[in-house]
Amino acid sequence: MFPRALILALAVFVASTACLSLDINNQTSIRQAATVLAGGIFEYHNISSTAGLFTQPEPWFWWLSGSGWTTLIDYTIYTNDTTYVSDIHSALSQNLGPNNDFVPTEQSGWEANDDQVYWVYSALTAMEYGFPALPCDTPSNTGSSCPNSWQSVAVNAFEDFVVRWNIDSQTCGGGLKWQYDPKAKGWVGNPMIPLSTRERLMSVSQNYKNAVTNAGFFQTAARLARYTGNQTYADWATTVWNWSITSGLIGSEYHVFDGTSDEADANCSSVNHMEWSYNLASYLHGAAHMHAYAKEDTIWETIVNGLVDSANTTFFTPSSNATGIMYEQICERQAMCSVDNTSFKGSLAKWMGKAAVLVPSVAPKINALLRPSAQGAAASCSGNNSTCGTKWYIGGFDGQTGFGQELSALDTMLSLLAADAPKLSVSA
């Protein structure tokens, strides 16, 4: 038997000498690379599971499975490869919950607002691109709409967020708390790793009004506004955005900070200034949809440009010889990113690519960042084994791998295809 250290060294050597082939100037090459990575993502699918989940290393996070299925919806739409449609349908159906809002009984006591919204993004994405519908729960002869249609699911979740916002607005003048269930269980993270929104104590989760949660509500409202043309959704998106500014979650030059708290009458008087890429990304995508909804209004275009500039200064170019390559600046250099942290770059790449479509004026800025990032991501992958690393700026595989790394790489490849995807639809 080979020593464990030798096996790892061989794996790193093989991976670094057989990186994923990618020509960022060739759409066929990009699709082929995405196909390899989609297959790698699907290998994480726990076939024996009846809950439509992906196998992940400990600690295991339900929200990441939702993120994975959303990416496979994008993959299906962008490449016209229908390989995963039935599995996507099965997974989403199994996690809709009794109220068709992605609050399944199995996640009771664990699910938080941000977990839910990362599954809601799958319904929103399917709605916008006309992804094949789930089998309708309502018999066709009733004449009523399907309660499990993509739009119905997204609206149901939006209404959940409205109810919770009204409850949580007793403090801080508004804002959703991370955790909506006061009896929910918490998870204690490794004290040696910087705390992310997923690694906070239960006492914090029930008082913490965090960016990813409120950005998720904002994005959901904004996407429904663009799709339906309904001013009510736009009004809610504006309300959440304005609160995010006044609370300090969005600071000067559009930096997006992790959260604030109403614990012990703090009333959100101080802000946790940690910056994670998926927080900014969540607001960016919502703002791009608000621009598309508002049409001639330049306010949201200015906001989108500001968020892209902030992303550029915070999450790109880790060194002078890695211009335009994405990295998670809090944890990546130190090799201390947790399971969920490694997936955050995927959200930023995904929503930057879509923002470039919704706000064409910002496309040159975005493409100048996504293209070198995709090249760096491909260099971190090991070809046929489709194993991708965390650090995209070292010119090869760094020996770190997992579901989050694979997902981020795939999202970044797909972001280069967003401009050629079918046009986002609107409701009839």
Image (spheres, grey):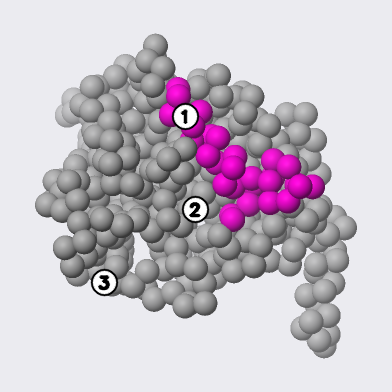
- Tell me which segment is drawn in magenta: 301-329
Density class for disc 1 (Cα within 10 Å; few <14, some 14-19, many ≥20) is: many
Magenta stretch contains residue 317: yes
Whole-percent x, y for residue 38 in the image: 63, 47
In this view, 374 is above or below 145: below
**CA separation in Å, label 3 and label 2:** 21 Å
**CA separation in Å, label 1 and label 3:** 34 Å
- The quarter of the image holding the N terminus is bottom right
Q: Which residue is mark 1?
A: 304
Three-letter code, disc 2? Trp
In this view, 17 is above or below 233: below
In this view, 323 is above or below 428: below
Q: Viewer-proximal residue, 8 or 75?
A: 8
Q: Is residue 240 left or right of residue 18?
A: left
Q: Residue at x 80, y 69 (%)?
A: 11
Density class for disc 3 (Cα within 10 Å; few <14, some 14-19, many ≥20) is: some
